Amino acid sequence: MSETVIDRHMLEALVCPMTQRPLEYDPEKQELVSKAAKLAFPIRDGIPIMLVDEARKLDM
């Protein structure tokens, strides 16, 4: 899987759709992680998919 460059300004503007809290970028998995909601939102072709139904549940 090739790594996509993500715009830092975009990342700073995005928040978790459930908690409205900041997200952390995981470049290895190409995901935006919401520790508060225990969800990881995928990034596909450089586009964050911010739908709860598309998020992966985290074991934290």
Image: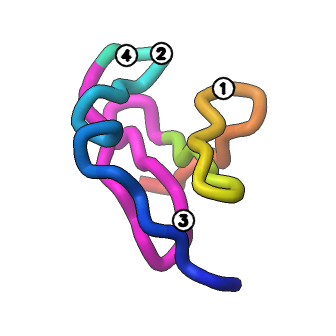
Q: Nearer the viewer, mark 3 or mark 1?
A: 3
* Crowd rating for badge 2 (residues with CA inside 10 Å; few <14, some 14–19, many 20+): few
Which quarter shows the C terminus? bottom left
Pick whichever of labels 4 and 1 is earlier in the sequence.
4
User: Given the image, on which type of amino acid does mark 1 rest?
Assistant: Val
Residue 54: percent from left, percent from top: 75, 37
- Element at label 1: helix
Calculate the distance from the C-alpha at mark 2 to the C-alpha at mark 4: 4 Å
Calculate the distance from the C-alpha at mark 4 to the C-alpha at mark 3: 20 Å
* Crowd rating for badge 1 (residues with CA inside 10 Å; few <14, some 14–19, many 20+): some
Numbered tag placed on residue 19 in the rendering? 4
User: Given the image, on which type of amino acid does mark 2 rest?
Assistant: Met
Tag 2–tag 4 contact (CB < 8 Å): yes
Numbered tag placed on residue 52 in the rendering? 1
User: Given the image, on which type of amino acid does mark 3 rest?
Assistant: Gln
> Which range is magenta?
21-38
User: Given the image, on which type of amino acid does mark 4 rest?
Assistant: Thr
Numbered tag placed on residue 44 in the rendering? none
